[in-house]
Amino acid sequence: MVLAQLRSGKLLVMQPPHWLAEVAAVLVRRLPNAAEWLVQRLLAMDVEVVQSAPVYRHAVVLARSTTTHLFDTLYHAVAMQGHATLITADERYYRAVHENGSIVLLKDWRQGS
C-alpha cells in the first residue's frame, strides 16, 4: 500500500543524509549480486534529503531522552521537523519513542494517518 501511494505521488519521501548508505549496506549483505543495480535505482529516485541543524539537534535530544540509536532518531526527526509521519516496521523503536508523536507502525498505517 505504501509503495502504491509513493508511485501515485500521494506520499512524499523525506530522508536523512545517511539513508542511502544504510540501505546500500543492507543490499550488499543480503543481495550482493543485485546491490549495485539496486543502488543505482535508488539514486535515480527523486528523494528529498533533509540535512539541517534543527533536524540534527532534534535527533540528538530524541536519542538521548529515549536511549535509542541516533541513526534511527534522524529519520524520526526528519518527520517531526517536516510536520510528517515516520512509517516504520521497527516495533522496538516505535515502543521507545511513540509518545513523542509523528510515528506509526507500518502494519497500522493507513493513508492520512
Image (cartoon, grey):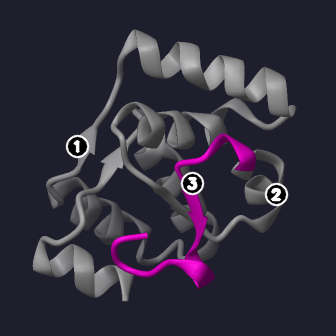
Residue occupying the point 76% across, 36% down: 69
Of badges 1 and 2, nearer the viewer stands 2
Query: Does the magenta run of residues contain 110?
Result: yes
- Image coordinates of residue 43 in percent, x first then y, are 23, 54
N-term mark: 2 or 3? 3
Q: Are circles 2 and 3 on residues that touch, CB within 8 Å? A: no
Mark-to-mark CA distance, 1 and 3: 20 Å
Residue 95 placement (x, y as % from top left): 82, 57
At x 38%, y 49%, the residue is 84
Q: Which residues are magenta?
A: 99-113
Measure how far apart labels 1 and 2 are at the Cα level.
27 Å
- Look at mark 1 in the image and give the residue it sits on: 48
| Amino acid at circle 1 | Glu
Q: Check disc 1 and report its element: helix, strand or loop.
A: strand
Q: Earlier in the sequence, mark 1 or mark 3?
A: 3
Numbered badge on residue 95? 2
Q: Circle 3 sits on which residue?
A: 25
Query: The disc labelled 2 sits on which kind of residue?
Result: Arg
